[in-house]
Image (cartoon, rainbow, N blue to C red):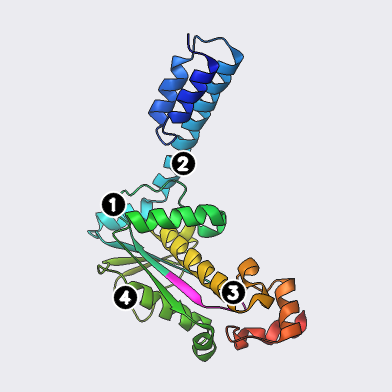
């Protein structure tokens, strides 16, 4: 009979994304009445259940992609943005074309994911995507044309950076007027479509990295912490030091309210 240490070591080596292996491992321990062995078996079953639930969730997030495939589209591009609301920094758009039935476990709306996990998913999206691009429109341009138009401009730039041309766009709640490619606008699309979720990861991680670089240039504002959003300490810094070159002047009208 295997020792508990040997069972634990065997469990640690199992691919935790393979539900069949996990269930098979749990079944192999059915006759082992030691409490520690039963606990390991339970962990294996729970891990299998989590993977099954995650794959079921991702299946529902592929429904829009499957509809597009049935309509004859192959290069389906998700579009999303990050940074519409902050007082400082750029708005960034992501554009991602994933392979058919691409599996990226944990892929979701970037706002629902921890920064560490977003970074991991960013690398996986970039590795697995057919094509991915990011568009960046800075604060000065946002002030010139307003945030909505800057949003559209960033999205067009992201699309233009793709190595292959998409056949259809799945957008998070917008229709881009400058684009002639067929589009579908999906409200809360970053939580409903794997393509849009992937784009949201690209946009968010790209913008966060930019804001961390700005933090090194303007450390007194705390950009690495709040990423330019209107937190109490950010407002306090603006009042103390005044706006810096990456602040959106058109957004600072609310300053006196704080």
Can residue 204 be found in the magenta stretch? no
Q: Gap between marks 1 and 2, in whole Å?
A: 18 Å
Q: Nearer the viewer, mark 4 or mark 3?
A: 3
Pick whichever of labels 4 and 2 is earlier in the sequence. 2
Query: At x 49% / y 19%, what residue is drawn?
Result: 6
**Magenta-tinted stretch:** 86-93
Mark 3 closeness class: few <14, some 14–19, many ≥20 residues within 10 Å: few
Most extreme residue toward the left is: 72
Pick whichever of labels 1 and 3 is earlier in the sequence. 1
Q: Nearer the viewer, mark 4 or mark 2?
A: 4
Tags 4 and 3 in contact by the CB under 8 Å rule? Answer: no
Mark 2 closeness class: few <14, some 14–19, many ≥20 residues within 10 Å: some
Q: Gap between marks 1 and 4, in whole Å?
A: 21 Å
Q: Gap between marks 2 and 3, in whole Å?
A: 38 Å
Tags 4 and 2 in contact by the CB under 8 Å rule? Answer: no
Residue 141 drawn at (x, y percent): 49, 87
Residue 193 seen: no
Q: Nearer the viewer, mark 1 or mark 4?
A: 4
Q: Which mark is residue 160?
A: 4
Residue 121 drawn at (x, y percent): 45, 54
Left or right: 102, with 255 as reference point: left
């Amino acid at each position: 009979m295997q020792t508990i240490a040997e069972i634990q070591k065997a469990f640690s080596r199992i691919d935790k994304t393979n539900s069949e292996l996990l269930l098979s491992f749990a079944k192999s321990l059915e006759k082992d009445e030691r409490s520690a062995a039963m606990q390991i078996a339970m962990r294996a079953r729970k891990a299998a259940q989590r993977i099954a639930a995650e794959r079921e969730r991702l299946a529902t997030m592929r429904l829009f992609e499957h509809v597009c495939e049935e309509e004859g589209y192959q290069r389906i591009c998700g579009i999303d943005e990050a940074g519409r609301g902050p007082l400082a920094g750029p708005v960034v758009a992501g554009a991602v074309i994933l392979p058919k039935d691409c599996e990226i476990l944990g892929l979701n709306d970037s706002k629902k994911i921890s920064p560490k996990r977003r970074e991991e998913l960013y690398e996986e999206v970039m590795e697995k995507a057919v094509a991915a691009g990011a568009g960046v429109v800075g604060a000065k341009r946002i002030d010139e044309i307003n945030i909505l138009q800057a949003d559209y401009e960033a999205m067009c730039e992201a699309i233009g950076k793709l190595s292959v041309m998409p056949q259809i766009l799945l957008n998070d709640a917008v229709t881009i007027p400058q684009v002639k490619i067929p589009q579908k606008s999906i409200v809360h699309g970053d939580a409903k479509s794997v393509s849009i979720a992937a784009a949201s990861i690209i946009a968010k991680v790209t913008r966060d990295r930019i804001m961390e670089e700005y933090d090194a240039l303007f450390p007194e504002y705390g950009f690495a912490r709040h990423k330019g959003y209107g937190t109490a300490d950010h407002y306090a810094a603006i009042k103390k030091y005044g706006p810096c070159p990456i602040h959106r002047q058109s957004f600072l009208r609310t300053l006196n309210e704080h």
